[in-house]
C-alpha cells in the first residue's frame, strides 16, 4: 500500500509542477462490494480507486494528448492491488462544404501492473481507431474500424488481436425522438501455443552415448467472430428528462471453440466473461434526469440471455468435467448514479463533482461457478483543475 501511495503522490505533485499547462482531473472513489469475486461463495471487501487524468491540446490544433492512471487499493485483499496506465493520442479533421463531416483517429497504449502474486493478469495493449461521421442533413451516418492487440506477458495463450468494423445510422425527428441502428462485425484471434516435449535413452556415463529426441508442436492460432445488431430509441420527455430503450443481439459466427472463461472474477471482465465466447440477446433502458442545482440522476438496467459457444456447465464445485451441458446465463442489472457539480472561477479549480453509485447484478446460470448475486455501493469526488 505504501508503494502505491508513493507512486500516486509522486505523479500528482510532478504534474502540478511540471505540467501546469495540462487540463487535470483527479477522482477518488470508494466502493463496498458484497461479492468481490462474483462467486457463489460471496466475499465482501472495500476498495478505493484513485484516477488521475492529464489532457493537453496543441495550440490551434485538433491534436490531443492524454495520460490516465488508475490505482486500485483493497482493504482486505491488498495482495490484489493493481494499477492501469494509458497514453492516448487523438485528432480529428473536419471537411465538406460547411465542414459538416468529421474524420476521427487515434491511438491508445495501455499497461496493467499487478502485485507479484497476481502478475499473470499483467498485460500491455495497443488500440488504434479510425472513425468517420457524415452529416447528410436528413440523417447522421457513422462508420469506423478499430484494432486492438493485447499481450499477457505471463499468460501467453490468452494474448490476442481484435478487429471491429461498424456502421451506425442516427435519425432525429420533430417529436424529439432519435432512432439509432447499428451493426458491428468483430474478429478476435488468440496467439498460437508452442508445446515442447522430449524423450531419450540415457547412458551410464561410461562411454554410452545419450540420445535425446525433441519435438516442437505449434498449434495454429484460433479465432472467434461475431455480429452485433443494435436498435435504440431515445426520447426527450421534457427539457430536462430523457430516456432510451435498446435491443441488442449478438450472433456468433464461429463453430465450436476450446476457449473457456476464467471462473474467478477480478476486475477484468474480458477474462471472466469474454464477449466473443457467447451469443446473446437482451434489452436495456436508462432514464436521465437533469435536476436543479447542477445535479443529475441516471437510473437504468438491462436483461441479457447468453448462450455459450463451447463452454460446459459445472453442476458443483467438484465437477471438473462439466456435466451440466452447454452453459447458459440470464443476467439482470440495475443501477443508479447521482452526481452534483460545483463550478468555480478559480485558476486552481474549475469544478468539483460528487458522485454516488449503486449497482446490482443477478446472474442466474446453470453452471455453479457463475451463479451469483452482486451489489456494489460507492461514492466519489472529482476535481478538475
Image: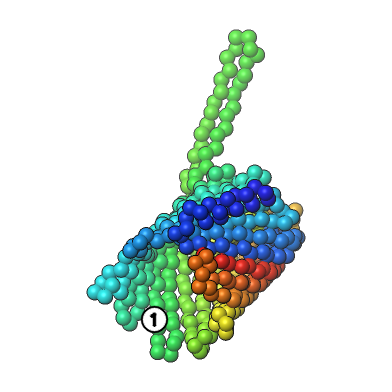
Q: Is residue 312 visible?
A: no
The one of 73 and 204 positioned closer to us in this rendering: 73
Give the quarter of the image for residue 299.
bottom right
The one of 228 and 87 positioned closer to us in this rendering: 87
Q: Which residue is mark 1?
A: 171
- Horizontal and vertical percent position of residue 105: 37, 61
Direction from residue 349 to residue 64 in the image, left or right: left
- Horizontal and vertical percent position of residue 34: 73, 65
Q: In terms of secondary structure, where does tag 1 sit?
A: strand
Residue at the image point whose x is 65% and y is 14% from the top: 204
Labels in figure, total: 1
Direction from residue 15 to residue 97 in the image, left or right: left
When the figure is inspected, residue 71 is found, relative to residue 120, above or below; the finding is below
Colour scheme of the picture: rainbow
- Horizontal and vertical percent position of residue 362: 67, 70
Residue at the image point whose x is 47% and y is 55% from the top: 19
The one of 13 and 72 positioned closer to us in this rendering: 13
Residue at the image point whose x is 40% and y is 66% from the top: 166
Residue at the image point whose x is 65% and y is 57% from the top: 265
Q: Is residue 89 visible?
A: yes
- Horizontal and vertical percent position of residue 108: 45, 55
Direction from residue 7 to residue 184 in the image, left or right: left
When the figure is inspected, residue 32 is found, relative to residue 205, above or below; the finding is below
Q: Residue furthest top?
A: 207
Q: Residue furthest left?
A: 97
Give the quarter of the image for residue 342.
bottom right
Q: Residues within 10 Å of mark 1 (few under 14, many from 20)?
A: some
Amino acid at each position: 500500500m505504501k508503494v502505491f501511495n508513493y507512486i500516486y503522490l509522486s505523479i500528482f505533485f510532478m504534474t502540478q509542477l511540471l505540467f501546469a499547462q495540462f487540463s487535470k482531473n483527479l477522482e477518488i472513489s470508494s466502493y463496498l462490494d458484497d461479492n468481490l469475486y462474483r462467486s457463489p461463495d460471496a466475499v465482501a471487501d472495500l476498495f478505493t480507486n484513485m484516477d488521475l487524468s492529464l489532457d493537453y491540446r496543441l495550440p490551434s490544433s485538433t491534436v490531443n494528448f492524454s495520460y490516465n492512471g488508475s490505482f486500485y487499493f483493497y482493504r482486505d485483499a491488498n495482495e490484489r492491488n493493481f494499477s492501469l496506465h494509458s497514453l492516448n493520442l487523438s485528432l480529428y479533421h473536419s471537411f465538406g462544404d460547411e465542414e459538416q463531416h468529421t474524420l476521427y483517429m487515434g491511438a491508445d497504449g495501455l499497461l496493467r501492473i499487478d502485485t507479484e502474486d497476481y502478475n499473470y493478469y499483467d498485460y500491455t495493449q495497443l488500440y488504434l481507431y479510425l472513425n468517420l461521421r457524415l452529416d447528410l442533413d436528413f440523417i447522421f451516418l457513422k462508420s469506423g474500424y478499430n484494432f486492438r492487440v493485447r499481450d499477457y506477458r505471463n499468460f501467453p495463450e490468452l494474448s490476442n488481436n481484435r478487429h471491429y468494423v461498424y456502421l451506425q445510422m442516427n435519425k432525429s425527428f420533430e417529436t424529439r425522438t432519435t432512432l439509432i441502428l447499428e451493426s458491428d462485425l468483430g474478429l478476435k484471434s488468440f496467439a498460437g501455443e508452442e508445446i515442447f516435449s522430449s524423450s531419450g535413452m540415457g547412458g551410464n556415463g561410461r562411454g554410452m552415448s545419450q540420445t535425446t529426441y525433441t519435438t516442437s508442436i505449434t498449434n495454429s492460432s484460433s479465432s472467434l467472430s461475431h455480429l452485433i445488431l443494435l436498435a435504440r430509441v431515445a426520447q426527450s420527455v421534457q427539457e430536462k428528462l430523457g430516456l432510451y430503450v435498446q435491443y441488442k443481439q449478438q450472433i456468433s459466427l464461429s463453430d465450436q471453440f476450446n476457449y473457456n472463461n476464467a471462473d474467478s472474477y477480478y476486475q477484468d471482465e474480458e477474462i471472466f466473461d469474454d464477449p466473443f465466447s457467447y451469443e446473446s440477446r437482451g434489452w436495456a433502458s436508462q432514464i436521465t434526469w437533469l435536476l436543479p442545482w447542477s445535479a443529475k440522476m441516471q437510473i437504468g438496467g438491462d436483461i441479457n440471455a447468453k448462450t455459450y459457444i463451447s463452454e460446459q456447465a459445472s453442476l458443483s464445485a467438484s465437477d471438473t468435467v462439466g456435466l451440466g451441458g452447454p452453459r447458459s446465463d440470464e443476467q439482470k442489472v440495475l443501477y443508479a448514479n447521482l452526481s452534483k457539480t460545483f463550478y468555480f472561477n478559480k485558476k486552481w479549480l474549475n469544478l468539483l463533482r460528487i458522485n454516488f453509485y449503486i449497482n446490482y447484478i443477478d446472474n442466474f446460470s446453470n453452471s455453479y461457478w457463475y451463479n451469483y448475486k452482486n451489489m456494489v455501493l460507492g461514492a466519489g469526488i472529482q476535481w478538475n483543475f
